[in-house]
Amino acid sequence: MSDWECDTCPFRIRCGQANEGYEDVGFTGLLPGVDRYRKHQLVEYFDAYPDAKLTPTLAHQFPALAEEHGVYDWHCPTCGGTYAWDAIDIEAQSPLCERCVEDDELCTVAVPMPESQNTH
């Protein structure tokens, strides 16, 4: 395969050709923090998985799709706190849980990984 083919392939992030840290992740579900999905890809995804939701990163890019399909909440794996998708600054490299920060802990919030997303 040529380099230019990888640049146009929608699976390059999942196969390890990109430096995203999602190598060998399954083909179903949206990758957290990845903003390179095109609108038509998302529309096709929602046609196939009508119960799926957007990640916060994509919700900021596609507010109409966010309103139509919903958005996954941020979740703190340490304290179990949840935050609305638009309550966290997505520009932050590692968004922190405010509750944990108040308890002098630095814990990052996340959204469900693809294998945990509701995509039945």
Image (cartoon, rainbow, N blue to C red):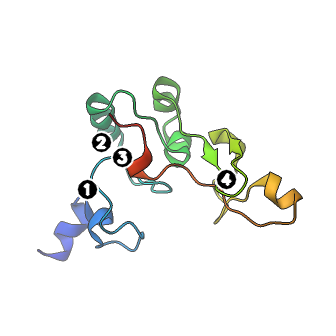
Whichever of callouts 4 and 1 sits on the residue coming sooner in the sequence is 1
Query: Are the residues flagged by discs 3 and 1 in contact, CB closer than 8 Å?
Result: no
Q: Residue at x 34, y 27 (%)?
A: 50
Whichever of callouts 4 and 2 sits on the residue coming sooner in the sequence is 2
Q: Residue at x 42, y 69 (%)?
A: 20
Q: Which mark is residue 29?
A: 3
Residue hosting label 1:
10
- Observer-side mark, 4 or 1, equals 4
Query: Are the residues flagged by discs 1 and 2 in contact, CB closer than 8 Å?
Result: yes
* Mark 1 → mark 2, Cα distance in angstroms: 9 Å
The crowd level at tag 2 (other Cα within 10 Å; few <14, some 14-19, many 20+) is few
Amino acid type assigned to the residue bearing label 1 in the image: Pro
Q: Position of residue 40 (x, y in %)?
A: 30, 38
Residue extending farthest to the left is 1
Residue hosting label 2:
41
Q: Is residue 96 above or below residue 54?
A: below
Mark 2: which secondary structure?
Answer: helix
* Mark 4 → mark 1, Cα distance in angstroms: 29 Å
Left or right: 1 in relation to 7: left
Residue hosting label 4:
76
Residue extending farthest to the front is 79
Left or right: 99 in relation to 38: right
